[in-house]
Image (cartoon, helix red, strand yellow):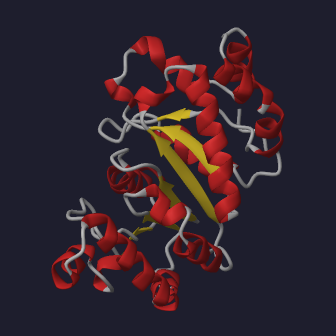
Amino acid sequence: MLVFIMGPAGVGKTTLTHKLGNWIKRNIDTDVGFVNLDPAVEFLPYNADVDARSIVDARELMIKEKLGPNGALLKAIEILEKNLDDLVIRIKELRRNYVIIDTPGQLDMFIFHDFGEKIVSALQEYERSVGIFLWEPSMLISPINAATLFLLTIIVRFRLNIPVVPAVSKIDLIGDQYRSTFYDSLAKIKEKLDKEAGAVSELISNVYTVLKEYSIPTRIIGVSSEKEIGFDLMYGLLKEVFCVCGDLT
């Protein structure tokens, strides 16, 4: 199984890649591979079996071509796209039961650039693929933001054409009074939205039909890479996402 870790910058994708991969190796007793697709990352806590920086390093591009951080990252992504076949072959040759794939820090560089769509499409032709879409816990203490996470998850799912599970990182930093929000199903979020006033709440509530139709029927997962909270639940959902039963609530 290929597991793509995605989300906005600073949400903890690289740390989750490291800790989840090690948790699977330790608790499931199976082989795990690590892939880094971020050409701009400075430090990796895991040993990458395949590293995009072996093809292009965005930091070196900044110096060589006198580019800013964003310009260098965009240029690096374009170079990775040109070397797509090489990357795909390297990942295929890992032949591990699980391959955890760490995506670029800037979400838009992967989700909305052709590189992300193309490499996911090429890889899922030979192996089941699933995405974990991470979000900051501070953004999800209201039902409006929780519903927005589901909406963004749908966008990512359709853009990449793989199942995507919504998750909230760093829940160990959030008080107990908020944690129940992270385990709300879409139906529960809809109930809370109906009780709130305001145009945004009404808008999100009105697109509930779309959310219900196209979302994977799951609850939002709360995880902590630092304390390995929620890893058992996350692993279970990754396994069940391809189950014919379909409902992960």
The residue that appears at 15% across and 79% down in the rendered structure is: 63
Quarter of the image holding residue 224?
top left
Q: Number of numbered discs present?
A: 0
Quarter of the image holding residue 186?
top right
Choose between 99 and 218: the one closer to the eye: 218
Q: Is residue 234 visible?
A: yes
Q: Can you give x and y, in whole percent of width and height, for residue 16 in the image?
A: 38, 50
The residue that appears at 44% across and 36% down in the rendered structure is: 223
Q: Can you give x and y, in whole percent of width and height, for residue 244 in the image?
A: 82, 51
Indicate left or right for 122 with 178 as reference: right
For the N terminus, which image quadrant?
A: bottom right
Indicate left or right for 214 with 149 as reference: right
Reply above or below: 18 against 179. Answer: below
Reply above or below: 184 against 223. Answer: above
Q: Can you give x and y, in whole percent of width and height, for residue 59 in the image?
A: 21, 73
Indicate left or right for 191 with 173 as reference: right
The residue that appears at 29% across and 84% down in the rendered structure is: 54
For the C terminus, which image quadrant?
A: top right
Q: Can you give x and y, in whole percent of width and height, for residue 221 in the image?
A: 54, 35
